[in-house]
């Protein structure tokens, strides 16, 4: 009986092996047939519901915006063509940065700053009488003529130097290329009182007055020998040499102008005295 069982077992095993082999073969053939069907893996089913379509549209727009932002960011970082607007702007910025980094004394051989002003021995007369009460007045003078104010201030223009050259040739060229020039006006200022008076930059307030009536403040050029600085005072019965510089269109005709209002608390207005008199001066050059 054993031999028969063993033989039957072999027959059964053989049949099972053939069955499995046949099943695997069919499975592979079916898989190949499915893979050979065109468009099977690339099949795309667009959403059919309204909600699905809206979600799909939102995702598409979001993707487009992300791509656009990336492109703009790349262009802003200098990826644009040098001939484009972005490239041109970058070139301008680079040039201005280069100009700012140039030293003040970036001077070529032979460039010299204008020498200190020559006052030619001019003098002021500080012996004029001071009234008890000031009255409003407009004074007009010419070159080398003194103007004396009732508060003890005296001034005279002794010379005008056109096309003043500062210490920096670079600054000089920038001014010249814009069609302007620096004009140096040389003053004598005096104090006819026995008390100190302020003569700092802001205190003097000597302006250039153009033909159309507009006024121009002086430039602060401290490097020049007789330039005035804020905080300076002038002692009683003293005189000081002062140079002031005005940036004007080249060849402009101008005069020197100053005006100041005073307060006189003790003025008796019923007797014709002014409580707030104004003194002004014009010096034609």
Image (cartoon, rainbow, N blue to C red):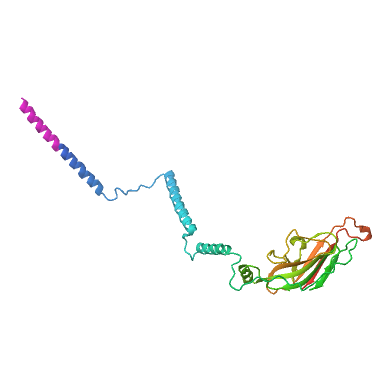
Q: Is residue 91 left or right of residue 57?
A: right
242 or 255: which is nearer to us? 242
Q: Residue visible at 74% across and 70% down?
A: 185
Q: Position of residue 265 (x, y in %)?
A: 88, 55
212 or 93: which is nearer to us? 93
Residue at the limit of the structure toward the top, as seen here: 1
Q: Is residue 78 left or right of residue 45?
A: right
Q: Is residue 196 left or right of residue 243?
A: right
Per the rendered image, the range of residues in magenta is 1-18
Q: Position of residue 163 (x, y in %)?
A: 68, 73
Main SS of the magenta segment?
A: helix
Q: Position of residue 269 (x, y in %)?
A: 91, 58
Q: Residue visible at 14% across and 34% down?
A: 16
Q: Position of residue 234 (x, y in %)?
A: 79, 61
Q: Say which quadrant the C terminus sits in.
A: bottom right
Q: Residue visible at 77% across and 63% down?
A: 204
Tell whether position 136 is magenta: no
Location of residue 152 (image quadrant): bottom right
Q: Is residue 278 left or right of residue 181?
A: right
Q: Say which quadrant the N terminus sits in.
A: top left
How many numbered discs, if any? 0
218 or 16: which is nearer to us? 218
């Amino acid at each position: 009986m054993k031999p028969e069982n063993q033989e039957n077992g072999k027959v059964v095993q053989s049949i099972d092996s053939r069955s499995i082999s046949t099943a695997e073969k069919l499975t592979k053939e079916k898989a190949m047939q499915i893979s050979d069907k065109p468009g099977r893996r690339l099949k795309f089913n667009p959403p059919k519901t309204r909600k699905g379509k809206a979600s799909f549209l939102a995702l598409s727009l979001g993707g487009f915006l992300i791509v656009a932002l990336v492109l703009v960011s790349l262009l802003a970082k200098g990826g644009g063509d040098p001939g484009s607007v972005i490239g041109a702007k970058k070139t301008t910025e680079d040039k201005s940065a280069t100009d700012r980094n140039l030293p003040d004394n970036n001077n070529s051989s032979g460039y010299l700053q204008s020498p200190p002003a020559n006052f030619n021995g001019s003098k002021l007369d500080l012996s004029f009488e001071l009234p008890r009460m000031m009255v409003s007045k407009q004074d007009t003078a010419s070159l080398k003529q003194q103007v004396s104010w009732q508060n003890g201030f005296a001034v005279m223009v002794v010379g005008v130097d056109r096309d003043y050259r500062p210490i920096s040739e670079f600054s000089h060229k920038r001014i010249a290329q814009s069609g302007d020039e620096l004009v140096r006006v040389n003053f004598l200022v005096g104090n006819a009182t026995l008390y100190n008076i302020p003569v700092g930059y802001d205190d003097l307030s000597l302006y250039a007055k153009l033909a159309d009536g507009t006024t121009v403040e002086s430039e602060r050029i401290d490097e020049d020998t007789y330039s005035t600085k804020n905080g300076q005072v002038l002692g009683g019965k003293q005189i000081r040499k002062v140079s002031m510089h005005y940036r004007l269109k080249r060849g402009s005709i101008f005069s020197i102008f100053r005006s100041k209002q005073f307060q006189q608390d003790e003025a008796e207005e019923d007797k014709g005295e002014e409580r707030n008199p104004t003194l002004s001066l014009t010096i034609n050059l």
